[in-house]
Amino acid sequence: MASTDQLLQYLVSGVTQGSVYALVAIGFTLIFNVTGIINFAQGEFVMLGGMVSFWLLHTFALPTPLAFLLAIAVTATIGSLLQRLAIHPAKDPSTLTLIIITVGASILLRGLAGQLWGKDAVPLPAFSGEAPILIGSATITPQSLWVIGTMLVTMLALKLVMEYSMIGKALRACSLNQRAAGLLGINTRAMSLASFSLSAALGALAGIVIAPITLTSYDAGTMLGVKGFAAAALGGFGSQFGAVLGGLFLGVAEALGAAFISSSYKDAIALLVLFLVLLARNRTAGGEH
């Protein structure tokens, strides 16, 4: 049985990890709302953010902020290429076809990363030191604060973009009714491209902020993608705020599971949550017919 101090420490860790799941889940919702596609390559965008940053830092000795910005730009470009070269050419694709395309892209990106950068886990430097900060009876690293803060700022920035910018309003219109948005003069293809690019950038950002804590590797995005998908399913694919709540819930659930059951079941908890959500939605959908 975990003590109160240990429980608080687990909760702090859960919120940190949940913030990463939230960022990944937001990426899922962005693409799904605009295009109706569930992008199973989202986890690989997270991996690319960390691995490209490491490559730029150690190969070209770039300043850390510049390396991070370039890594986000490179990943956003790869997201755009995925939409343009794989999704866009498909003619009247079924949902299953689109899922297979994104799964194939995920496998391809992971394989290329393994060939380019090897299969060893590598670190990124902490943004502002590693000396722990005492919060009550728990400690939190400065990097954890960066993770949580990045999630909150991203959520606020996206809300402002969606509410007040022209591209945000166009993305919202596509999410409500893509055909009607097209009839109103909105370039739905461009909005689809923008959603993939923005989603990839968010994934890269998540990979960069979490890598100093958990390291990064060619396959780091696999479970993060699954957990981000579980968070999005839990909170609802139609809501970015719901995706954030789903991510935080999942992170805390994993932490409490580690505290009261065993850390060996950490990944199983996410899969169990996903299974229960899908089961509940399937029963609800079945009851409506």
Image (cartoon, helix red, strand yellow):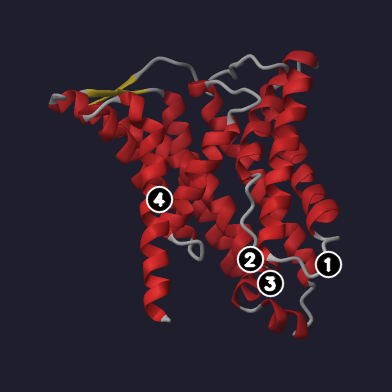
Mark 1: which amino acid? Lys
In the image, 272 versus 160, the foreground residue is: 272
Q: Within the image, what quadrant is residue 98 found in?
A: bottom right
First along the sequence among labels 2 and 3: 2
The local crowd at label 1, few if under 14, some if 14 to 19, many if 20 or more residues have their Cα within 10 Å, is few
Mark 4: which amino acid? Phe
The local crowd at label 3, few if under 14, some if 14 to 19, many if 20 or more residues have their Cα within 10 Å, is many
First along the sequence among labels 3 and 4: 3
| Cβ–Cβ under 8 Å for marks 4 and 1 | no
Percent across and percent down for residue 41 are 66, 44
The residue that label 2 is drawn on is: 36
SS assignment at label 1:
loop
Q: Residue at x 35, y 24 (%)?
A: 264
Camera-nearest label, 4 or 2: 4
The residue that label 3 is drawn on is: 170
Q: How far is the residue under mark 4 from the one under mark 1?
A: 32 Å
SS assignment at label 2:
loop
SS assignment at label 4:
helix
Camera-nearest label, 2 or 3: 2
Q: How far is the residue under mark 2 from the one under mark 3?
A: 15 Å
Percent across and percent down for residue 182 are 76, 80
Q: Residue at x 32, y 39 (%)?
A: 252
The residue that label 1 is drawn on is: 91
Q: How far is the residue under mark 1 from the one under mark 3?
A: 23 Å
The residue that label 4 is drawn on is: 275
- Judge whether residue 92 can be spotted in this image: yes
All told, the count of numbered labels is 4
